[in-house]
Amino acid sequence: MGNIIIGVIIAFIISFYAIPIIIQFADQIKLYDHPDERKVHKNPIPSLGGLGIFIGFMMGLLLTQNIPAVSAQLQYFFASFLVVFFFGVKDDILKIKPMKKILGQLLAGIIIIFKANLLFTNFQGFLGVTYIIPSFGVLFTLLTIMVIMNAFNLIDGIDGLAASLGILTSCTFGVFFYLSGDMFYSTIGFILASSLFAFLTYNYSPAKIFMGDTGSMLIGLINAILVIRFIETAPNTNFFPKLTSTAMGFGILAVPLLDTLRVFGIRILHGQSPFYPDRRHLHHILLDRGFNHVQILYTLVSISVLITVGTFYILPIGCTYTIVAQLVFFFLGVYLLTKFIPEVKKKAPLNVEKIVEPEFISTSSNQILH
């Protein structure tokens, strides 16, 4: 427990004092996320907040871990974090081609799977499936890592949202790993939450800085690592009914995952690319109905808490039925929201000609269309 507390303090202090320096540096060299028809902010704002998150997280972890004792995985985790960091920073500054970012995500996932040996071996009862063959496990793990990374990238659409959801999910995983005696992964969860909390003090509406792809992809990668470990190890504890860890892990990450899958599904049904930019994300829907940034933040975080707690209490009905209940609750809620709460302003027309990148690989800084 002592290492966790020390790591949390270190990560918070470093991120908290690093971010103002990053803001000042960005002001000096005029490195901003400029407003356009796709974004909600009116003034140029730095988008390198992910750099402060990364520095605080890495220092907190490095200074509290016994490297020889955990080096079998830790060194490869660091390698994957660095891959995401460099691809994210380059995109936030220079804008890289879509395929390069995809390759960066693939590389990070491959390191996690083949070097850190972290992958799915069991569906834990979902659809009645337990053991899965190794080749499918590799593909499904890689897909999971990439989906979660892009889900946090897309949820970063308003001030404070991605950081707040990241704090909630990483703390939830951190508590579980602490109670189950898995201190290494518990430390990862709590240190990430601490770095994000420091960042949130500058990103809370009105934001002084955005996290950019550097921050959102790092949050996604770390949460992917935590949820894979959680699903694989939870059946060995007494905290949950057997063969339900998949449902619990899915519930913890439900808001970013289901919102992304919902939007992709709608676009495909309309004959569009799943990466076609539009105003279908949940934070867009709430914004169009008169909610401000703070109200949307608290609404979506509250929904995430409700799904997480509700999932825990209905786990005895079984893994598959629990996931079905999560889907019904989420999609029914979105339907009722759009059906009974009218819009307070019209959607602005989308100028497709000015959009040069698919949504999921564009800078994650407040991607709200105007």
Image (cartoon, rainbow, N blue to C red):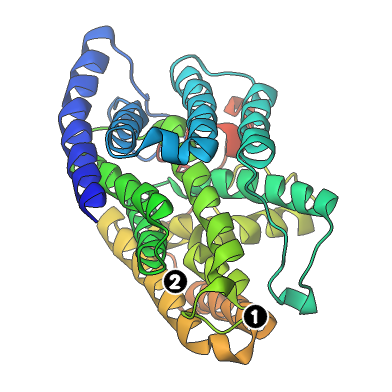
| Quadrant of the rendered image containing residue 296 | bottom left
Which residue is the site of mark 1? 319
What's the amino acid at mark 1?
Cys
Q: Is residue 235 above or below residue 89?
A: below
Q: Is residue 78 above or below residue 89?
A: below
Instruction: Please give left or right for residue 208 compared with residue 283 in the image.
Output: left
Judged from this view, the residue extending furthest toward the front is 68
Secondary structure beneath dot 2 equals loop
Secondary structure beneath dot 1 equals helix
**Residue 290 visible to the viewer:** no
Residue 172 position within the rendered picture, expressed as x and y whole percent measured from the top left: 38, 64
Q: CA gap, disc 2 to disc 1?
A: 36 Å
Q: Residue at x 61, y 62 (%)?
A: 232
**Residue 209 visible to the viewer:** yes
Residue 225 position within the rendered picture, expressed as x and y whole percent measured from the top left: 53, 49
Q: Is residue 85 above or below residue 216?
A: above
Q: Residue at x 54, y 80 (%)?
A: 329
Query: Which one is in front in this view, the residue at disc 2 or the one at disc 1?
Result: 1
What's the amino acid at mark 2?
Pro
Which residue is the site of mark 2? 342
Q: Residue at x 52, y 65 (%)?
A: 254
Judged from this view, the residue extending furthest toward the bottom is 317
Instruction: Please give left or right for residue 278 compared with residue 9 in the image.
Output: right
Nearest to N terminus: mark 2 or mark 1: 1
Camera-side residue: 331 or 104? 104
Count numbered badges in the picture.
2
